Amino acid sequence: MFTGIVQGVATVAALTDRPGLRTLRVAFPSGFLKDVEIGASIALDGVCLTVTGFDEAASTADFDVMQQTLSLTTLGGLQPGLRINAERAAKEGAEVGGHVLSGHVDFCASVAQIRRPDNNCVLRFAVPAPWMRYVFAKGYIAVNGASLTVAEAGYEAGGGGWFDVWLIPETLRMTTFGDKQEGDAVHIEIERSTQVMVDTVRRTVDERLGPLLPVLKAWARSQGMKDLEGPIE
């Protein structure tokens, strides 16, 4: 489990590729790996990975990333020298300053727009369908492992859309968001209780309205409206 509070910015030190597997060697800030053990979980840009080797004196650790993870995340595009957000797994009794995260990425969004008002940075992320159904203004969302609050959200036909987050200077200092450019891909983990609530409501509505769909379609056609198709959005 993670809390979405980025604890440091790490740097990709080396990559080793084998069939179906990539090993990352990552350099962390001094002291980050104190008391780390083989098998420990560390989130890199929001992806939960397992420590397979480490050198505490050099402040480096190794991680094996399987092909599916490489295909579904941006980890397959990492190169030596790139900076990534890092967080150690939460310990029992730790303060949850953000919100509870699993480190399992749901999808990748892209940076659609960057605005820089005085002493702030506003990032707008483009979200593919159907994931905008889980994004709400003032709700939690995790972007590259950082727990953030959605400032505004826009919805498009088909289930896509966008959302904005506002970042203060301290957030930019402690994360890699200041490095991002328009078009860059980022990892998104939606807030689980929101997903459960939305999916439960959608299933309930589908079940209740399912038997009425033939009647609704006939009424829509009688009114000159486009036929109703697919599940309720």
Image: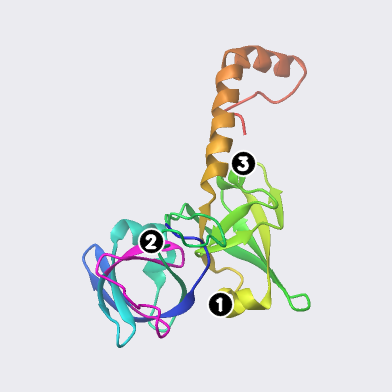
Q: Report which quarter residue 76 is drawn in.
A: bottom left
Residue 8 point in image, percent of width and height: 48, 77
The segment highlighted magenta reads 26-51
Residue visible at 40% across and 57% down in the picture: 72
Query: Horizontal and vertical percent for residue 62?
Result: 28, 74
Mark closer to the observer (3, 1): 1
The residue under label 1 is which amino acid type? Met
Tell which of 162 and 150 is nearer to you.
150
- Does residue 12 appear left or right of residue 206 in this picture? left
Query: Quick one: label 2, few (<14), some, or many (20+) residues within 10 Å?
Result: many
Residue at label 2? Answer: 48
Secondary structure of the residue carrying tag 1 is: helix
Colour scheme: rainbow
Compute the Cα span from label 1 to label 2.
19 Å
User: Relative to residue 122, is residue 58 depicted above or below?
Assistant: below
Residue 81 image point, x, y percent? 42, 84
C-alpha gap between disc 3 and disc 1: 36 Å
For residue 2, which quarter of the picture? bottom left
Label 1 or label 2, whichever comes before in sequence order? 2
Q: Which mark is residue 158?
A: 3
Q: Is residue 102 above or below residue 13?
A: above
Q: Write down the residue under mark 1.
A: 174
Task: Name the quadrant of the N terminus.
Answer: bottom left
Mark 3: secondary structure: loop
Q: Residue at x 54, y 76 (%)?
A: 176
Q: Residues within 10 Å of mark 3 (few under 14, many from 20)?
A: few
